[in-house]
Amino acid sequence: MVASAHLFCLVALTFTLALAVDHTPLQDFCVAHPKSQVLVNGLACKDPTLVEANDFFFRGLHLAGNTTNPVGSKVTPVTFSQLPGLNTLGISLARIDFAALGTNPPHTHPRATEILNVIEGTLEVGFVTSNPGNRHVTKVLQKGDVFVFPVGLVHYQRNLGSANAIAIAALSSQNPGVVTIANAVFGAVPDIASDVLAKAFQLDKHVVPNLQSKF
Ligand code: MN
């Protein structure tokens, strides 16, 4: 009885861990098929005999993203969508450009841990632990510094400098996903009822439609 309970716990734990990251590949590669209509967890594989070097290649991360937008930052992703050879490999990359005082606003990646390397400028970064602590773990990073944002936690970056800043981020999923908190909550389509948001954010009910109109 005790042994079977332990076995059950072990199986349950293993199952949970297996779902916490992308699945392990069962073959050398599975380059995303550009036109397959097959719906699988990831994308269907291109015929391996037709795979070429360009399937494992992306050019353009030397190019600055356009930060002329309300938050003053731009993420240039390199996921399986831009680099089909990443399909099933459980990893991806992004370049993040920041205008002076630009912010990559609070967001989460439901499927990935993110490790970030500042290659230009000075960034304030932070993440918040889950309930009930909600501890804000924050640090100011200089060029060459590296910081990690654990999977699923809300995190952000802000450029403290008066010049542009650049970071490169690696993520532990071919498709990390992004949930930008403000957009998800105030920009949901159709709207979340203003009563719900007024209570959740302890706002005057009349402020909510104004916030919703911005997203
Ligand atoms: Mn991120």
Image: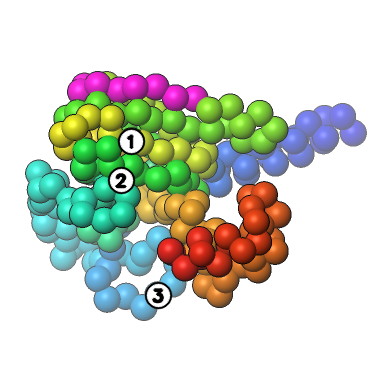
Q: Nearer the viewer, residue 122 or 113?
A: 122
The answer to whether residue 89 of the structure is visible from this angle is no
Residue displayed at 27% across by 48% down:
72
Question: Which residue position holds label 3?
Answer: 38
Question: Considering only vertical position in the picture, is 195 above or below 68?
Answer: below
Question: Which residue position holds label 2?
Answer: 92
Left or right position of 191 against 127: right
Question: Considering only vertical position in the picture, is 95 above or below 54?
Answer: above
Q: Residue 130 falls in which quadrant of the image? A: top right
- What SS does tag 1 mark? strand
- What SS does tag 2 mark? strand
Residue displayed at 33% across by 35% down:
158
Q: Residues within 10 Å of mark 1 (few under 14, many from 20)?
A: many
Residue displayed at 70% across by 64% down:
195
Residue 163 drawn at (x, y percent): 15, 34
Tell me the amino acid under the disc marked 2: Ser
Give the label on residue 7, or none.
none
Residue 164 drawn at (x, y percent): 17, 37
Query: CA–CA distance between discs 3 and 2?
Result: 22 Å
Query: CA–CA distance between discs 3 and 1?
Result: 40 Å
Q: Residue 190 falls in which quadrant of the image? A: bottom right
